[in-house]
Every structure is written in C-alpha cells, then in structure tokens.
Amino acid sequence: MAGQRLGEFEMIARYFAPLAADAPGAFGLRDDAAAIALPPGEDLVVTTDAMVEGVHFLLKDGAARIARKLLRVNLSDLAAKGARPIGYQLAIALPESLASDEWLGAFCAGLAQDQKAFGIALYGGDTVRSPDRLMLNVTAFGAVPAGTMLRRDQAQTGDDLYVTGSIGDAALGLETKLNHRLFSSAAMMFFDSRLHLPTPRLAFGQELRGLAHAAMDVSDGLVQDAGHIASASGLRAVIHADAVPLSLATRQAVAEDKSLLPIVLTGGDDYELLFTAPPQAEQDIAALSRRVGLAVHRIGSLEAGSGVSVSGAGGQPLDLARGGFQHFGGTLE
C-alpha cells in the first residue's frame, strides 16, 4: 500500500480531514470556507508563510520534519505578534510522486504531532498537483486582546533591543548541510535540530504585550531583521555583537573559526523573538524571562538615524558581507 497513488478527494478525506476534527468551524473540510468565532474584545491575527522545495527544505529532510517546521515558522510569526494560536489553513502543491500513502502519512503525522503540542487544528486549505517540486503554504490564525498586537513599527528612540534564546545555531546547521562544514557530532546534531525544529516562543510573546514597543521573529537573520524594525520605526538599530547570545556549541565553533561570526549574525532560521522595550522595562523583562524559563538578552538599542550598525570587541564596527537571507538570491540546490 506504500506506493498507492491517491486522488485529491481521497487524500483530503484520509489524511487532512482528521486534522480538522478539533476545529468546529472547519465543518470536516466539506465546505469551501471555514468560520472562526472570537470572544468579544479580541482581534484576529493572520499570518502566511510559504516553503518551497529546494529553497526552504530538501525532500531528504523527511516528510514529518518538513511538516513540523512548516507549522512552527508560522506559529513563530504569531508569537512575535503576542497572539494566542487558534489554527491554520494549508495549501499544498504536490508532485505526483509524493501523492502516496507513505509520504502523506508521514507528513500528516508530523502535522498532527505539532497540532497536539501547540493546541491548534486545521481549518481548511487547498490541495493541487505540482508539475515538479513540492510547495507548501500555511495561513495561521491567532487572537489578541483588541488593539494589543505587537508590531514592527512602534520602536522608540532610546529603546533597548532584546533577543530570546540563542542566535546562529540554525545557520551553522545549514553550513553543515550545504557546505559540509564539520563540527563535533554532538554539535552537528544540535545544529540540525535547531534548523529543522525551531521552537515558537508563544508563551513569551503573549506576555510581551504591554512590555515591548516593537517585535518580530528572527527568520532572515538577526542583522537584517533588526533592520526591519529600525526601518519600519524610522530609527537606527545598534547591535553589540559580543552581547548576542550564543549557545555553547556555537560559541565554541566561533572561537575556533572567527569567520563563522558573520554567518551566525546574518544566517537566519533562528525563530527567536527580537523586540524593543524602554529601559525602565528591564526588570519586568528579566522577571518574564525567569517566569517563562526562556533566556533573553539585551543586545543593543534604537537611536535616531537609519540602518543598522554592528560593533565588535572594543566597539569597532564589524564589516558584514550581507545582512541576511533574501529571496531571488539563492536556493538550497
């Protein structure tokens, strides 16, 4: 049965409809649209992310891991908005070779695993045939108290710039994958996990409402994403490289090869939260870090001006070859 090819409606009934069982407004995926009811006083938050074979993943990454990363990068966007996740819609363009019980079973098992982990359900979408490669798109839905969604464009002069977790682990995972860079076996396993299974910082993001002025998640690289906040807010971001939090594995790798530091700062796929807050919020942010159990570090500030500056040891400016990932500039192939 592993190689059996499935038709569109059989595929939906067998694999996707069960993922909608906990979504009352999905109507068992038997309608053309879904209905999402929100409690009074809440705003709906909507975000969309696409992943394309050869650009964001390779088939050899495994169907379940592809599915889980697809959900997690969208949930990370909701986390950066301070939203409580509700569910998602999935559009999948599937090559004929993958329209089988074996691949779809693994893919939907990955979706089901993370639906349970994050308390969400499938609300619908579309399933079509692709002539060559796999293309995936998720639109995720969340909710916030009315008027409280965190935005990129609200940073203020004098704000501190913070980031959660650690930066650069996923970038080094991509280095091992694409450029065959070798680290210790334990480090490579850690980097690979951080690349393929990022952790959306949902609890932290929801508690940032009222503390942070501006926020986003780090997907295209720390430097570039700090630039997005700065540009949207009409300010300049100043980053102190020695304050950027690195995991032990990444710190050791950079200590052994200084050329890795620009990759760490610009590589992307971290899916940590990058946010600004006034200096007087420092103690509250430290308390939130302890309460949620997630490290957070102050890495710089926002000032009058434009662009991003990155300083190294002794305050000397770092010359980075690029700011971060951009589409139409390269693929995984």
Image (cartoon, rainbow, N blue to C red):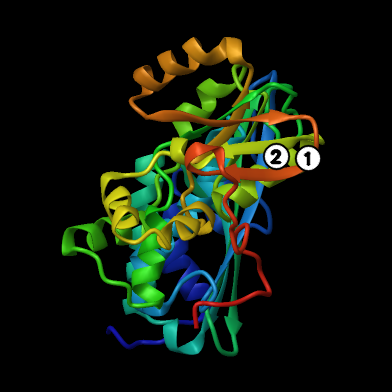
Q: Is residue 236 above or below residue 17?
A: above
Q: CA distance from mark 2 to mark 1?
A: 5 Å
- Left or right of 7 on screen, residue 251: left
Q: Nearer the viewer, residue 122 or 150?
A: 150
Q: Is residue 32 above or below residue 115?
A: below
At 36% from the left and 63% from the top, the residue drawn is: 173
At 60% from the left and 56% from the top, the residue drawn is: 319
At 63% from the left and 57% from the top, the residue drawn is: 323
Residue 211 numbered mark, or none: none
* Placement of the N terminus among the 4 image quadrants: bottom left
Q: Is residue 34 above or below residue 184?
A: above
Question: Which residue is denoted by mark 2 in the rendering?
Answer: 229
Q: Amino acid at mark 2?
A: Ile
At 37% from the left and 23% from the top, the residue drawn is: 292
Residue 277 percent coordinates (x, y): 62, 22
As helix, strand or loop, the secondary structure at mark 1 comes to helix
As helix, strand or loop, the secondary structure at mark 2 comes to helix
Give the image quarter of residue 276: top right
Residue 113 percent coordinates (x, y): 33, 52
Question: Which residue is denoted by mark 1 in the rendering?
Answer: 232
The reply to whether dot 2 and dot 1 touch (C-beta < 8 Å) is yes
